[in-house]
Image (spheres, rainbow, N blue to C red):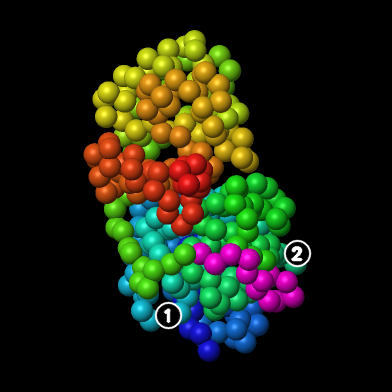
Amino acid sequence: MKKILLIGTGGTIASEMTASGLAPELSTRQLVALVPALAEICETDCMELLNLDSTNIGPLHWLQMARCIQTQYDAYDGFVLTHGTDTMAYTAAALSYLIQGSPKPIVLTGAQKPIGFETTDSKENLTDAFRCAASDLPGVSIVFNHQVILGVRARKTHTKSFQAFASINYPNLGILRDGVLLRYIRQDCLSKPVFYDRLNSRVALVKLVPGMDRAQADFLLERNDALIIESFGVGGLPEQGGFFDCVRHWRNAGKLLVLTTQVANEGSDLGVYHVGRRLKDDLQVLEAYDMTTEAVTAKLMWILGQTQDLALAEQLFYTPVARDILWPVRNQA
């Protein structure tokens, strides 16, 4: 029987009603006790790492999770992390960069309703996560509402529905049906994982709105090492408002700028319109292509934690990790 480590970080799944609203209260041992079917799947050990609403989870906590898994890696066949849904996609992406090529499953799950509620998705999600952690499912994934989603491809798309997450620009790795994992895709892995222990959180995000000028981008780039710009459609910047001069100035100052799209599916393509082609050809802005904003954010933090060399940073950005970016590779083939 496989041996799985359950790592608790808080979230709705472990929450109870308090005078100020739902808050994480339950331990991992209490969660396991409420789902006796887990004993038929694997042997389980429990660890309390954090007890936070996921709104409060950030890069320092991601490093803490990765260190915990690294310390315990040889002792277990797989890992399940319970986590709040609001930032779970960011955490899954970050762990995909901090723990690369893991042959063992690292599964994140949570719930839209606390485990103590009469109508809850907690027990099914937790059971499915353990089934996946005890299976041949390498790398980082999110298991939620019977779907198995690649860690760098997940996005929360519903605030209340049980089907909270979707896989963006990539198929689900599999589904769980009647308690059986039907795996469609097996992630690539190494014989041993490569762990990283540095992130640079000086990464900012700005979302374009019609009529906006460069002031917000300048403000953020003065205080950060990289800026992600969520543009319209396939991508581009307004010709008014000084954006092109802004990009040129901060590129020359050694900052990383990435253009992505506000549209969830099908990604960016800066070569289509003149408002985008100039950015790519003349100003050498990085393009996110089919990556999610969550993955771009985590990847930039990981890259800038390893190097400040712009050329190397750009090379790393376009180097696929856990199938986070496919378009440049496809176009080169």
Indicate yes or no whether the magenta region holds residue 257.
no
In the image, residue 224 sits, relative to residue 243, either above or below, namely below
Quick check: 1 left or right of 101? Answer: right
User: Which amino acid does the dot numbered 2 rest on?
Assistant: Thr
Please say whether residue 58 is visible from this viewpoint. no
In the image, residue 233 sits, relative to residue 73, either above or below, namely above
Indicate yes or no whether the magenta region holds residue 182.
yes
Q: At which x and y percent is residue 308?
A: 24, 40
Q: At which x and y percent is residue 217?
A: 41, 23
- Boundaries of the magenta span: 176-187
Q: At which x and y percent is residue 62?
A: 40, 56
Q: Residues within 10 Å of mark 1 (few under 14, many from 20)?
A: some
Name the one closer to the observer, 199 or 266: 266
Query: Residue shown at 48%/23% (left/top)?
Result: 277
Query: What is the residue that sits farthest to the top in this orientation?
Result: 240
In the image, residue 201 sits, relative to residue 218, either above or below, namely below
Residue to which mark 2 is pinned: 119
Give the alpha-carbon distance from disc 1 to disc 2, as whole Å: 32 Å
Residue to which mark 1 is pinned: 76
